[in-house]
Image (cartoon, rainbow, N blue to C red):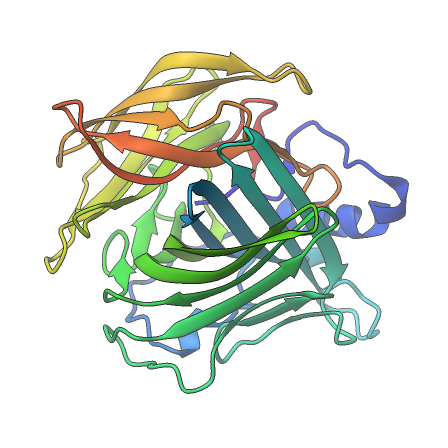
Amino acid sequence: MHPPLFPAAQAPGLPRRSVLLAAGLAGVFGSRLANALPLKTLRFPRDRGAHPDFRTEWWYITGHAAAGSRTFGFQLTFFRSRVDGTQAMTSKFAARQLVFAHAAITDVQGKKLWHDQRIARKGFDIATASDTDMNLKLRDWSLAALPGSAAGNGNTGSRYAAELPASDFGLKLQFTETQPVLLQGRQGLSRKGPSEQQASYYYSQPQLATRGTLQLQGKAFEVTGTAWLDHEWSEEILPPDATGWDWIGMNLDDGSALTAFRLRDKNGGAVWDGGSFRAAGGQPYIFSRGEVIFKPVRFWKSPLTQTTYPVEWIVRTPADFYTIKAVIDNQELDSRQSTGAIYWEGLSDLIDSNGTQVGRGYLEMTGYASPLRM
């Protein structure tokens, strides 16, 4: 999962972006009613590409990598949003589809998060999102499947390349599949609430072998590591009484993959929960409603936004009782210049019920600064 495009009751930020942000709000809060999504077979490489008929979509890669004794977390996300109010417009300048992107590096030893963001309307070769395969571009940022990559359902070996230069940092990474695609939910149809309309098409690619270059303040680090890719698209995800969510995507050291999430109401209760566990070489076990419980253990207050986040959790799943610990507390992302949301997303350790660290991945928490709507 990933943050919806705008927090409720929060006006988008900068004047120079006001036209695009207003168009984005029109898309997110448009009057078109969503129908229940049908169960279907996801097909690749087609479903690695964009689905412009759906309101919201994102491609999301998180991971950790090392260069010698230096350890980093990294995150990159491309969003696509259909703007309902402009679909009938014929002008090439109409903001019919918007493309957003985020990128971040967590410098573990330096205890610092670096973050940047982009936004543009689709078109004019400035922002593109192919509907035949993964091929995304937003100005000088890109994420694409490499030519010749394996493309069959369940095959491994496909490769992706990401290049996202920013002001004080940059990512230039390649990712190679080592495991088959993980279909979340019911064969890729992932329920997100009590109503059948609250669902998404959702697949993951855990245990991606990663190599490339991370740059920080002009210094390049040749890194190797492990990443996780999520791709999700939907008409409607959040139930009306949900204000945000907590989500983890964890690569275990033994090759297993763990996903767990819950949607929260304003009192912190679970509106919906779910996830999956797949042992290396095994079949996924899809969690049923009520099988995942998030319990906060330790909190951190952001000095920038004064928002309080749980940065250590106990998460009960059918696979085990896990402890999730942020590697550094300050991994808050302020994206008010693009998607409008403030959220926490960062590299975290996964510790099993015996107290042994068994993996690493990303924890994402939304709706703590202000309620989110989608």
Where is residue 290? Give x, y as percent.
Answer: 21, 29
Q: Position of residue 358 (x, y in %)?
A: 21, 37
- Pick the residue in front: 360 or 48: 360
Query: Would residue 335 appear left or right of 183 to someone viewing this image?
Result: right
Give the residue at x 56% y 43%.
Answer: 105
Q: Quadrant of the N terminus?
A: top left
In terms of depth relative to the viewer, which is nearer, 265 or 224?
A: 224
The one nearer the camera, 346 or 201, is 346
Residue 79's x, y, as percent? 58, 55
In the visual, does 124 lie left or right of 104?
right
Q: Quadrant of residue 303?
A: top right
Taking the image as shown, residue 104 lies to the left or right of residue 293, namely right
Give the residue displayed 34% in from the left and 47% down from the top.
196
Tell me if residue 36 can be seen.
no
In the rendered image, the vertical position of residue 37 relative to residue 245, given as above or below: below
Count how many numbered circles sit on residues in the image.
Answer: 0
Residue 351 visible in the snapshot: yes
Question: Of 51 and 39, which appears nearest the observer?
Answer: 51
**In which quadrant will I find the C terminus?**
top right
State the residue lying farthest toward the bottom. Answer: 148
Q: Residue 9's image quarter?
A: top right
Quadrant hosting residue 83: bottom right
Residue furthest out toward the right: 15
Residue at the image position 61 percent from the left and 24 percent from the top: 370
Residue 16 appears at what percent x and percent y? 89, 47
Hey, which residue is sitting farthest front in the picture?
Answer: 68
